[in-house]
Amino acid sequence: MDYGHTLEFGAFVNPGSADPAGVVELARRAEGLGLDLVTVQDHPYQPALLETWTLLSWIAGSTDRIRIAPNVLNMAIRPPAVLARAAASLDLLSGGRLELGLGAGHFWDAMEAMGTPRLTPGDSVEALAEAIEVLRAVWAGDASTPLELPGAFHALDGAQGGPAPAHTIPLWIGALKPRMQRLIGAKADGWWPSLGRLGSGDLAAGNAVVDAAAVEAGRDPREIRRLLNITGSFGPTAEGGLSGPPAAWVERLLPYVLDDGVGTFVFAASRVADLETFATEVAPALREAVAAERAARETAVGAVVPLAIRAKRREGIDYEAVPASLAASAVEPGHAGFAGVRNTYLRGGSPGLVLRPSSADEVVQALAFARSQPVPLAVRSAGHGISGRSTNDGGIVIDLSRLNRIEVLDTATRRVRIEPGARWGEVAQALQPHGWAISSGDFGGVGVGGLATAGGIGWLGREHGLTIDHVRAVEIVLADGSLVRADAEHRPDLFWAVRGAGANFGIVTAFEFEVVEVGDVGFAQLAFDAGNVAEFLENWGALQEAAPRDLTSFLIIGRPRGGQVVATVMAAVDSDDPDTVISRLQPFATLGPLLQQAVQILPYPAIVATPDGGQHGQGEPATRSALVDHITPEFAAAAGKLIHSGVSYFFQIRSVGGAVSDVPPDATAYAHRSANFSVIAFGAGRTRLDAVWDTQIQPHANGLYLSFETDPRPERITDAFPPATLARLRELKGRLDPENVFRDNFSVAPAEQGLRVG
């Protein structure tokens, strides 16, 4: 039976230790010849051979395109939980080029000599079945959720999942016996025997067993790729087996494809010349012959989506209609990498599909596809937004993380072009050699796209303004799919709206910024005993407003513990002069009894460092946000009551003002320019936090910062945008997005629709 698999060809490299460089060079030659796969046997108990995993890693680093695989790993000596992490790591490092061939173990005498206990055939099958479960569990696991998996041979007892591999790694099993073939049909992605160990009719018989087991498990047998290790010699005449001229090879191999369903031939070449003949004469001729026969037979060709993926697909999404340019990088709930893209920094999610475009054209295609599906749409740059609206349940997420390029356009004007998926820590690192920076929040893991369309309250804000104040142009995909440029001269109304309400008007695919000159900076962390919270807040606010603009500080207070309230002041001073830094900070040291202090002179990237790890949010975050002009006695007293109530476990005030207030209120959609402070509180639950906030804090507010708000009530839109600003936004929304496509993240509805939050 021809399963319609795309025909592929690989090389079987002998990992002899006598000439390690020659082994790697043969793998490089296989890549140069256009082969699809290079494979290495796994017999670490044989002293004359290189260790397989080490060799595969070296080959991966020495090649660029060719896929790599063990042929096959001896799972009797490879703990699957350790192998899962090693495989994911190598797959990530190689750019998604690892495939895994697995075997139960064969040379038992040699393995027993190394301390490996012999398994019965039945135990070998069960052990390999459990190993497959462990591998997939670790790859699919979320690092925040311990993995529990019982097993007689391999078990997980509280292990952490991840890292997720770069792609869903297929598991191909090398086996000849019916029990193992049944396991392949039930659980594996491929059957990988060697021709030299097969008798007449063994392929057909094995396929029958594999197919029956697949059908019994609810799978399509075409999900399972059939691979075949082959060897032979080239010469003027055929002498039995695989031998003779290339044409004789093609004639002999063709039935294995058409009658036995082989989709991958892996050639064990003893000479480079034979590998070259196989790659340049046999492979193309066999492809041509197979294509002709398939056309005549009208054989369907292509991959079949595995049951494990199909079973987890969500209703309302036509997965088969995903554009080809996006399909390869798209992530579904059944994919190994889903745990790494489903959540955001604070919010748990379970989208039905995550599209990951890598160009503006692909963003256009992704948006068109998303609009054609009757499910929610979310757009994500890095997933750090506190609102958490860059994920959803059952919908589509357009993830912009692959649009992450940072480019200097003009050194004289300090103009740079940055794509939305770049993270601010990466931006800081890229700009630092030029002596430049952009004030960009306080955390390097935040994506450029979300911050640079909302505001950007950062460590340099009082001296250099908001992040949006340095945007000079955007390239943006609108709701109708058009890609346009907006700046002060071109589409000025859209350019105005993007700076403060950008999530409502399209998907920005690139920003142009005019950055500022910034060298090393002073950075302080001062912890105080804030016994009288209201007095402490009022005094801190007064000091901050009176401070020179080159000082920006943030204040954090947690729940009272043991009757004590600890307040932490973090401050950045845009100076590398120690005396200047100390003189700026000295007044703050008198705010109360100091519990701890640290002051350093650091490069700007050091205070917005990019973290490692993915997004592991859970549940729904509960936060409230407010902008206030001053820390008045009345506001300080109200904030003190909120802190002592215990409903907020994290209370922060960020200083704004200074250069932020220099910009006219109507210059951008971020209009609350008079505010000197941005206030945010995290609560354990929505109801209690809202009740205290609405009565204690809201009466003192003069707007809010949407990036820090999670309250879904429609009044938050009127808090975020003054009446004139909101009216202008709604009118523009009616022209550019009348169907309110971009409505998930605090929707500004078109004028005729009234206010609502999506």
Image: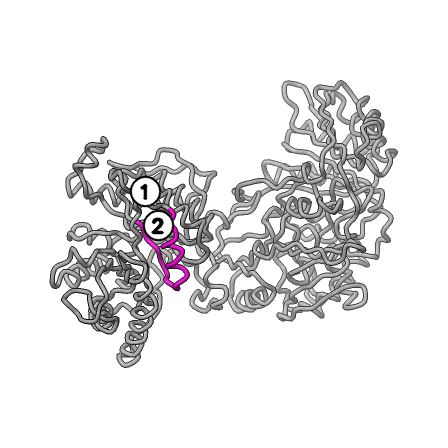
User: Quadrant of the rendered structure where residue 584 is?
Assistant: top right
Please tell me how crowded label 2 is: few (under 14), some (14-19), or many (20+) other residues with Cα within 10 Å. Answer: many
Looking at the image, tell me whether mark 2 or mark 1 is earlier in sequence order.
2
* Main SS, magenta residues: helix
Between 573 and 365, which is closer to the camera in this rendering? 573
Q: Which residue is mark 1?
A: 50
- Amino acid type at circle 2 is Val
Decide if residue 454 is in sight here: yes
Give the structural element (helix, strand or loop) at label 1: loop
Label 1 CA crowd tier, 10 Å (few <14, some 14–19, many 20+): many
> Which residue is at 27% across, 81% downward?
296
- In the image, residue 424 sits, relative to residue 478, either above or below, namely above
Residue 646 horizontal/vertical position (percent): 64, 29
Region rendered in magenta: 21-40
| Front position in the image: 264 or 150 | 264
Q: Give the percent coordinates (x, y) of residue 495.
A: 76, 62
* In the image: residue 406, left or right of residue 196: right
Query: Looking at the figure, which quarter contains the N terminus?
Result: bottom left
163, 433: nearer the viewer: 433
Between the C-alphas of marks 2 and 1, the distance is 10 Å
* Mark 2 touches mark 1? (CB < 8 Å): yes
Task: Specify whether residue 553 is painted magenta.
Answer: no
Q: Position of residue 741 (x, y in %)?
A: 61, 64
**Residue under circle 2?**
23
Checking the image for residue 647, the label placed there is none
Residue found farthest to the left: 200
Quadrant location of residue 445?
top right
Between 455 and 416, the one nearer to me in the picture: 416
Mark 2: secondary structure: helix
Assess whether residue 38 is covered by the magenta stretch: yes
- Amino acid beneath label 1: Leu
